[in-house]
Amino acid sequence: MMPLYNIYLKAVEMMQFLLIPLLLTFTRIWVAIVFFRSGYLKLTSWDSTLYLFELEYQVPILPWELAAYLGTAAELILPVFLVLGLFTRIFALKLFFFNIIAVVSYPVLWPGGFYDHQLWGLMILINVIWGAGPFSADYLLNKKMAQKKRGLSRFH
């Protein structure tokens, strides 16, 4: 029985080795595309965006015009960091809270789009918890910093 279990464990280990990096990359890019498209649409139809923020969206605390600018900027800037996988956890966490604010600010969205926002929130949390994975700028930076650290320790 144990050899069969060991084969199972090896198969799971191999699957995780191959699929987790793809999952982390997929979730980063999928969510980035969704939010970037939304920001681009807001930017290209700015009058409509201002109308929505003034009369439809109910962003807590912020004045509607500031919310329009900050929301559009967030949707255009945060996804770039996600695609690159640069400082992923920080920017994914910001996007996670932005996603929550989007849901809270637009109750009309709940019947039709709440599921999408839940899915995107989960995808974002995957990257908050596990990071960007090996196909990212974070991975390259960590590797470079580790090499630098090893290089410095030889001289001490």
Image (cartoon, grey):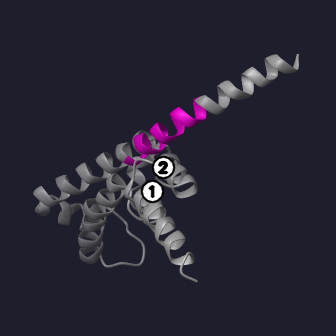
Would residue 80 be found to the left or right of residue 127 on screen? left
Residue 133 shows which numbered tag?
2
Q: Nearer the viewer, mark 2 or mark 1?
A: 1
Whether 26 is among the magenta residues is yes
Can residue 14 be seen here? Answer: yes
Q: Amino acid at mark 1?
A: Tyr
Predominant SS of the magenta segment: helix
Q: Residue furthest bottom?
A: 156
Q: Residue furthest right?
A: 1
Vertical arrangement, residue 9 with respect to residue 88, above or below: above
Can residue 98 be seen here? Answer: no
| Total marks in image | 2
Residue 28 percent location from the top left of the image: 40, 48
Point 18% across, 52% down: residue? 41
Give the quarter of the image for residue 81.
bottom left
Magenta segment? 15-28
- The residue wearing badge 1 is 139
Distance between mark 2 and mark 1 Cα atoms: 7 Å
Give the quarter of the image for residue 78.
bottom left
Residue 49 percent location from the top left of the image: 19, 61
Give the position of the N terminus as an image quadrant: top right
Residue 66 percent location from the top left of the image: 27, 77
Density class for disc 2 (Cα within 10 Å; few <14, some 14-19, many ≥20) is some
Q: Amino acid at mark 2?
A: Gly
Q: Secondary structure at mark 2?
A: loop
Whether 145 is among the magenta residues is no
Q: Are marks 2 and 1 in contact (CB under 8 Å)?
A: yes
